[in-house]
Amino acid sequence: MPGGGTKVPYPPSVIHPIVDLVNHCLLAIVIDDDPSVCRALRRLLQAVGIEVETYASADDFLQAALRREPDCLVLDVRMPGMTGPQLRDHLHSAGRLIPVVFITAHAEEGHGDPWGATILRKPFDGQALLDAIHETVRHGTKGQWSSDPTGA
């Protein structure tokens, strides 16, 4: 980063205050099999002060040694191997209730999620992703999902 690793200041007139919601820099994990999507989302999120780690697959993420639990996952719906929804379900069954924003290039998958996660259809506006992350983290959805979409 320019200036010897200094974080880019948060521009309050441009987006919601999603950095320092709970007195720390948010950590977002982006998992998408398209390297260009990972690069673009890394640049966008880092520009507003969000820490970002990217992975090309769910398996890569599951095998990673994370420094801390992420505040939010940005998951591609369709990936080779484990899909985004399958990863979310796997994490939930293991007790890791991490808020999720799904992204997809497939129209038929952009109509809703039984657990209430936001689904953004590619290509999406960067502000739409920032808003989705803000809402997902702000509403504390970590504890609101169950492994059963009916809530039973």
Image (cartoon, rainbow, N blue to C red):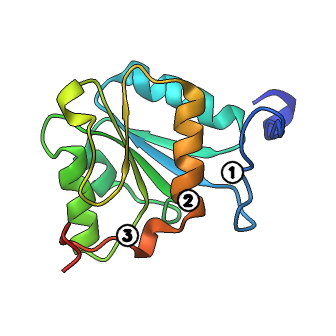
Separation of residues labelled 2 and 3 (CA atoms): 12 Å
As shown in the figure, which amino acid type bears the numbered disc 3? Leu
Q: Is residue 14 above or below residue 52?
A: above
**Mark 1 → mark 2, Cα distance in angstroms:** 8 Å
Q: Tag 1: residue type?
A: Ile
Is label 1 in contact with label 2 (beta carbons under 8 Å)? Answer: yes
As drawn, the label of residue 111 is none
Near mark 2 (Cα within 10 A), the count class, few <14, some 14-19 or many ≥20, is: many
Instruction: Check disc 1 and report the residue beneath it.
Output: 18
Q: Gap in Å between the C-alphas at discs 1 and 3?
A: 19 Å
Residue 138 placed where, x, y %? Answer: 60, 61
Residue 119 location (% of width, % of height): 35, 41
| SS state under label 1 | loop
The C terminus, quarter of image: bottom left
Q: Is residue 78 visible?
A: no
Q: Is residue 34 above or below residue 54?
A: above
Classed neighbour count for the residue bearing mark 1: other residues with Cα under 10 Å, few (<14), some (14–19), many (≥20): many
Q: Is residue 115 above or below residue 36?
A: below
Q: Quadrant of residue 128?
A: top right
Q: 145 left or right of 9?
A: left
Write down the residue under mark 2: 137
**Residue at the spot 60% in from the left edge and 31% down from the top edge:** 127
At x 60%, y 50%, the residue is 134
Closer to the camera in the image, 135 or 97? 135
Q: Residue at x 46, y 47 (%)?
A: 29
Q: Amino acid at mark 2?
A: Val
Dot placed on the residue nearer the N-terminal end, 1 or 3:
1
> Do the residues under discs 1 and 3 have CB atoms within 8 angstroms?
no
Q: Is residue 103 visible?
A: yes
Residue pointed to by mark 3 = 97
Q: Secondary structure at mark 3?
A: loop
The structure residue drawn at horizontal position 69% and vertical position 56%, both measured from the top left corner, is: 25
